[in-house]
Image: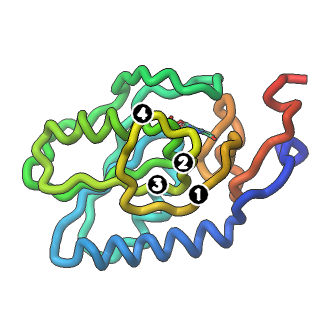
Amino acid sequence: MLQDIERVLISEEEIKKRTRELGAQISKDYEGKELVVIGILKGASLFTSDLFRSITIPAELDFMRISSYGASTKSTGVHRVLLDLDYTLDGRHVLIVEDIVDTGLTIKFLLEYLGQRGPSSLKVATLLDKPTRRKVDVPIHYRGFEVPDEFVCGCGLDYAEKYRNLRDIVILKPEVYSGK
Ligand code: IMP
């Protein structure tokens, strides 16, 4: 796995530090409120767990899973809910946690989908933001890092279901994608 890495874009230490900062900011912003944190599987599972432990106010944790790219690196914009919440969000303060906002189509879908369940507020946190690829305008309230227009892996992000367990955010060697 390590031999497939071209270079490290963001180190584990930088990710830890930024996650703690975001957790502190979220705890301050939602002071006196109760928060529902919804991580989007599978990519955001690791970042969500770390961010959740950095939040110091009362908070609930849940996960949703929606259809994603599969083994391809292109977004289709077609979404299917594979794992849903089994309760309403009436009057709740909800924070969606993503691994990366790329075209923005997934977050747009989630904001509309969860917005129909009556939350008091609905915000977005993402570890990574790739703004040059955006197809739709979406709000990002808590952003870990901006990344260039390159496919990245690690810290929960995969290529063909692999590399999620890399501790840094990395760029893989081109031959990994071409299958050579
Ligand atoms: P969007 O709907 O195009 O914003 O894509 C969001 C999803 O695409 C993320 O949750 C990831 O699962 C996946 N994705 C987008 N860019 C990358 C990348 O560079 N590496 C790994 N997954 C990515």
Q: Earlier in the sequence, mark 3 or mark 1?
A: 3
Q: Earlier in the sequence, mark 4 or mark 1?
A: 4
Most foreground residue, 175 or 166: 175
- Is the CB–ligand 1 distance for label 4 below 8 Å? yes
Mark 4 sits on what residue?
A: 105
For mark 1, give the secondary structure.
strand
Front position among marks 3 and 4: 4
Front position among marks 4 and 2: 2
Instruction: Indicate the quadrant of ligand 1 in the picture.
Output: top right
> How crowded is the residue under tag 1: few (<14 C-alpha within 10 Å), some, or many (20+)?
some
Task: State the residue at coordinates (68%, 45%).
Answer: 153
Task: State the residue at coordinates (69%, 58%).
Answer: 167
Is 6 placed left or right of 162 in the picture? right
Mark 3 sits on what residue?
A: 126
User: Looking at the picture, which amino acid does disc 4 mark?
Assistant: Leu
For mark 2, give the secondary structure.
helix
For mark 3, give the secondary structure.
strand
User: Looking at the picture, which amino acid does disc 1 mark?
Assistant: Glu
* For residue 77, above or below residue 88: above
> How crowded is the residue under tag 2: few (<14 C-alpha within 10 Å), some, or many (20+)?
some
Residue 6 position, x and y percent, is: 86, 47
**Which image quadrant is residue 33 in?**
bottom left
Mark 2 sits on what residue?
A: 131
Front position among marks 2 and 3: 2
Residue 111 position, x and y percent, is: 28, 41
Whole-angstrom CA distance, mark 2 to mark 3, is 12 Å
CB contact under 8 Å: marks 2 and 1:
yes
Q: Earlier in the sequence, mark 4 or mark 2?
A: 4
Q: Earlier in the sequence, mark 2 or mark 1?
A: 2
User: Looking at the picture, which amino acid does disc 3 mark?
Assistant: Thr
